[in-house]
Amino acid sequence: MLALTFFTGCTGLQGDWEGGMKCGDEAWPAQFVIQENEFDETTFEGGVVGALPCSRDGDDAFACNFMMNGIIYQSHPSGAQSLDIDMDSCKADGGSEGSIGFACEDPENAKWDGAKEISFIHQTTGGLACTVTLERQ
């Protein structure tokens, strides 16, 4: 009975996910939380640490976190599948220096292995395709 309970608890996307985003030769750590909201939608909120260069009034550049949230649509309740991810918002978060929102494209080629890994491609405004890979924690 214990094994059945454990297996049932891992059939959905909900939970904490960690991994990274790789763009060309550069890589940054990423953390996401996926949960079900009050409308039974699978939502996510996450960030990639230090992935965006920011500056304030032309001052020296500093690293901002790339923060995003949105909704994930599954084609099946469980198992390996392609995912449809709709971004609600993105922002560059500079901590005490402030933050600014910006438009971002929905990720492409989003996949879930049905258990421990999610991956998707995020197209940057500069046309660079970045791969985000996350593992269930």
Image (tube, rainbow, N blue to C red):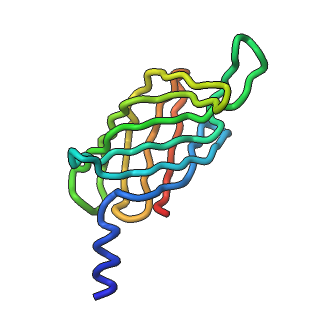
Task: Locate residue 77: give its quadrant.
Answer: bottom left
Q: Position of residue 101 (x, y in %)?
A: 49, 23
Relative height, residue 118 to residue 93 (above, below): below
Nearest the viewer among 94 and 80 is 94
The residue sitting at the right extreme is 60
Residue name at image x 57 percent, y 25 percent: 99
Relative height, residue 58 to residue 24 (above, below): above
Q: Position of residue 117 (x, y in %)?
A: 44, 58
Relative height, residue 84 to residue 17 (above, below): above
The residue sitting at the bottom extreme is 1
Nearest the viewer among 56 and 135 is 56
Residue name at image x 38 percent, y 42 percent: 109
Q: Position of residue 18 (x, y in %)?
A: 53, 55
Residue name at image x 48 percent, y 43 percent: 46
Residue name at image x 46 percent, y 61 percent: 136
Q: Is residue 33 toward the left or the right of residue 92 in the image?
A: left
- Quadrant that contains the N terminus: bottom left
Q: Is residue 69 toward the left or the right of residue 82 in the image?
A: right
Q: Position of residue 38 (x, y in %)?
A: 24, 47
How many discs appear? 0
Task: Locate residue 113: give its quadrant.
Answer: bottom left
